């Protein structure tokens, strides 16, 4: 619910930090835990995009294919940068110390197979459900395109929604979907409708959690 009313997923993450801190965890550890969970989700998203790139390589325009490769490369480097940050010979500073501790906690998580494997697997499953939802919405409005296009384009659009410059990723998701699908000949108006309907479906499924939250508060 909170993620639908604040930039990117900031609202939902902030609520998770508050909830964990109320359960006895320190706010700082709660913050690190939520952030690492986001990193794991990000890794799952990279895996899905990579798989989509493999199965749709032959039909993609060269420029689009190269652009996605660059996007994946920078995404992987960002995660790798978090992992090795703790080993960099950097001066002591509040921000640097915070990032170093994040890197240490991330490394501890990766050392535990039972910690990171379920997180990444769950993340992949969530994105698969999102892809399937978008695909069936497209079919419902008469847009029949190969499923593998959705396997590639939907995760990339969802990656764009992580940029905290719009509420719940609105606008970013639509822009990504329109730009990428238009490159393979899909009408912009149709794919825009599909993306909007997908966004509305996210709002609808978040309403029960909003109701339960308000009920507990009243």
Image (cartoon, rainbow, N blue to C red):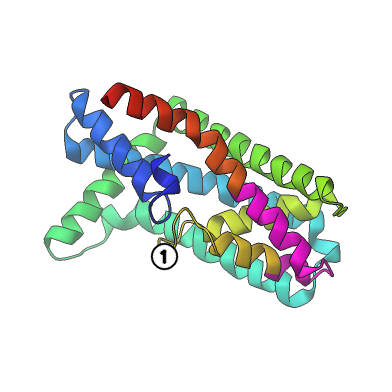
**Span shown in magenta:** 179-199
Indicate the position of residue 92 as horizontal and vertical percent values: 11, 61
20 to 99, vertically: above or below: above
Indicate the position of residue 146 as horizontal and vertical percent values: 86, 52
Query: In percent of the image, x 71 and y 47: which residue is there?
Result: 134
Which quadrant is the C terminus positioned in?
Answer: top left
The answer to which quarter of the image holds residue 204 is top right
Q: Main secondary structure of the magenta part?
A: helix
Which quadrant is the N terminus positioned in?
Answer: top left
Indicate the position of residue 197 as horizontal and vertical percent values: 66, 50
Whether the magenta-drawn stretch holds residue 150 is answered as no
Q: Nearer the viewer, residue 154 or 68?
A: 154
183 to 99, vertically: above or below: below
Whether the magenta-drawn stretch holds residue 183 is answered as yes
Q: Is residue 187 visible?
A: yes
Q: Nearer the viewer, residue 3 or 51?
A: 3
Indicate the position of residue 110 as horizontal and vertical percent values: 41, 37
Query: In percent of the image, x 20 and y 31: which residue is there?
Result: 21
Q: Viewed as shown, does residue 207 lie left or right of 194? A: left
Q: Nearer the viewer, residue 138 or 29?
A: 138
- Residue picked out by circle 1: 165
161 to 22, vertically: above or below: below
SS at badge 1: loop
């Amino acid at each position: 619910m909170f993620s639908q009313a604040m930039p990117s997923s900031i609202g939902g993450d902030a609520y998770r930090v508050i909830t964990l801190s109320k359960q006895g965890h320190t706010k700082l550890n709660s913050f690190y835990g939520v952030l690492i969970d986001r990193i794991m989700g990000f890794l799952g998203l990279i895996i899905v995009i990579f798989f989509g790139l493999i199965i749709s390589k032959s039909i993609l325009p060269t420029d689009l294919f190269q652009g996605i490769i660059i996007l994946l490369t920078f995404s992987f480097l960002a995660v790798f940068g978090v992992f090795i940050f703790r080993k960099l010979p950097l001066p002591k500073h509040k921000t640097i110390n915070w990032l170093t501790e994040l890197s240490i906690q991330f490394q501890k998580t990766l050392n535990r197979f039972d910690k990171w494997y379920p997180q990444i697997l769950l993340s992949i499953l969530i994105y698969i459900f999102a892809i399937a939802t978008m695909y069936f919405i497209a079919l419902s409005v008469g847009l029949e395109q190969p499923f593998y296009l959705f396997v590639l384009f939907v995760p990339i659009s969802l990656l764009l929604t992580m940029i905290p410059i719009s509420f719940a990723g609105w606008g970013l998701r639509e822009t990504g979907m329109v730009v990428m699908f238009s490159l393979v000949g899909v009408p912009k108006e149709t794919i825009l409708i599909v993306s909007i309907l997908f966004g509305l479906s996210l709002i609808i499924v978040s309403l029960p959690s909003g109701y339960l939250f308000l009920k507990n508060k009243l």
